[in-house]
Image (cartoon, rainbow, N blue to C red):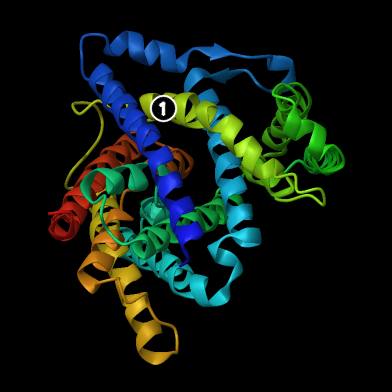
């Protein structure tokens, strides 16, 4: 890794730390609200329905948070993915192959662990819950517990988390999509194509003006999101699809993707993800959940805490042992396992998959508590493995 790439990774990680801390605070506030004297008011607010019913958008506040606001988060993920594929570390096979392969191992093993606990039951539908890595949480925790680890290891985590999110997006699109309305999907494709044409044709004016992206691109994006929602495909996919149409670098040197990422990041990390976390984490401990001994809870916790580091570390070892791929000399195996453990922080996307997986509230509440507990245990394990370098 050269100095320029190392500096960019460090800037990105520093930018993610405040957002991750804010999301943690919002999740804690939601959990406290759901287990306090204001629990009824909290539930009433989450279940309040708003929006135009004639357009099929008469949704609860909680659904707006998970289907609408979280699309902004996935738009940011899509921009980062495209930048990495076009001009970042993922453009070079030699740099990307190890963390990319490790990401697939970190998805497969947790899914198998969860399936082992829930085989033969309807709850096996939640196999994808422990497969996700939360970028915002992971990098925030990394910046707090191990600020001095090598830049190569930071890039390993960043690439791993980015590819992990791409896999999660694909899983949601393929396995958690209901019946598809073809007319709405075709209209959504037309809206996304219009977005792409405007973004490419007017990249320079959009980049220069502070208001043009909000006044021009945002309305088209909202229309595309609404049509994807109407099609039956989970609406957060619209955020990724729109992000992939944004040019990374134009002929005149305009970096529209980087500019949009800079301008929309406060909306994502400061509003969208914290609001989603506030409502998604609001699970009453004394409610209908069967945490912690239910197979759903055991599968989620074991998948996040054990499956993630085992899948990532084992895949990395096999790849470096039996191929010509190698790790940066500054990376120690203890620290790599610690990063694998940190990848078990699967908060945002894991909670989203939880909402898509279960029909009954008791199952969903059990899984939500397991996601929160598993993520905390993953942070503890990562801290123990990474703290030596920090000292």
The reply to whether residue 325 is in sight is yes
- Residue that appears at 40% across and 11% down: 44
In the image, 297 versus 169, the foreground residue is 169
In the image, 110 versus 266, the foreground residue is 266
The vertical placement of 236 against 335, above or below, is above
In the image, 118 versus 83, the foreground residue is 83
The reply to whether residue 281 is in sight is no
The vertical placement of 181 against 1, above or below, is above
Name the spot of residue 69 as percent of width and height, x first: 55, 28
Q: Quadrant of residue 360?
A: top left
- Residue that appears at 44% across and 45% down: 11
Name the spot of residue 297 as percent of width and height, x first: 25, 48
In the picture, measured across the screen, residue 294 lies left or right of residue 118, that is: left
In the image, 102 versus 186, the foreground residue is 102
In the picture, measured across the screen, residue 335 lies left or right of residue 95, that is: left
The vertical placement of 185 against 305, above or below, is above
Q: How many residues crowd mark 1 within 10 Å: few (<14), some (14–19), many (20+)?
A: many
Name the spot of residue 280 as percent of width and height, x first: 38, 30
Q: Quadrant of residue 39?
A: top left
Quadrant that contains the C terminus = bottom left
Q: Quadrant of residue 319?
A: bottom left
Q: How many marks?
A: 1
| Mark 1 lies on residue | 274
The vertical placement of 101 against 12, above or below, is below
Name the spot of residue 238 as percent of width and height, x first: 67, 40
**SS for dot 1:** helix
């Amino acid at each position: 890794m050269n100095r320029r790439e190392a500096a960019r990774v460090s800037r990105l990680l520093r930018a993610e730390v405040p957002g991750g801390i804010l999301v943690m605070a919002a999740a804690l506030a939601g959990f406290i609200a759901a287990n306090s004297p204001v629990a009824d008011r909290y539930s009433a607010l989450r279940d309040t329905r708003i929006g135009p019913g004639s357009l099929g958008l008469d949704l609860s506040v909680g659904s707006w948070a998970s289907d609408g606001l979280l699309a902004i988060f996935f738009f940011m993920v899509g921009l980062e993915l495209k930048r990495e594929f076009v001009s970042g570390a993922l453009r070079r096979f030699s740099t990307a192959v190890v963390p990319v392969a490790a990401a697939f191992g970190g998805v497969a093993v947790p899914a198998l662990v969860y399936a082992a606990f829930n085989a033969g039951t309807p709850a096996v539908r939640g196999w994808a819950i422990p497969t996700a890595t939360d970028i915002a949480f992971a990098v925030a925790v990394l910046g707090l517990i191990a600020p001095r680890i090598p830049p190569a290891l930071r890039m390993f985590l960043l690439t791993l988390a980015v590819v992990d999110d791409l896999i999660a997006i694909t899983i949601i699109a393929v396995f958690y999509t209901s019946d598809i309305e073809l007319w709405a999907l075709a209209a959504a494709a037309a809206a996304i194509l219009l977005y792409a044409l405007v973004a490419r044709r007017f990249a320079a004016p959009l980049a220069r003006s502070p208001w043009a992206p909000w006044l021009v691109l945002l309305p088209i994006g909202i229309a595309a999101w609404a049509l994807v929602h109407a099609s039956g495909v989970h609406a957060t996919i619209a955020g990724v699809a729109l992000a992939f149409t944004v040019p990374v670098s134009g002929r005149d040197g305009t970096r529209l993707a980087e500019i949009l990422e800079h301008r929309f990041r406060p909306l994502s990390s400061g509003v969208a993800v914290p609001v989603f976390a506030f409502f998604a984490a609001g699970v009453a401990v004394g409610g209908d959940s069967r945490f912690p001994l239910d197979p759903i809870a055991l599968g989620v916790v074991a998948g996040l805490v054990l499956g993630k580091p085992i899948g990532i570390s084992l895949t990395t070892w096999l790849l470096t042992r039996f191929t010509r791929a190698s790790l940066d000399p500054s990376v120690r195996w203890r620290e790599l396992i610690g990063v694998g453990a940190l990848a078990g922080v699967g908060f945002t996307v894991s909670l989203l998959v939880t909402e898509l997986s279960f029909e009954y509230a008791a199952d969903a509440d059990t899984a939500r508590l397991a996601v929160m507990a598993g993520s905390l245990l993953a942070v503890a394990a990562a801290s123990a493995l990474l703290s030596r370098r920090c000292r």
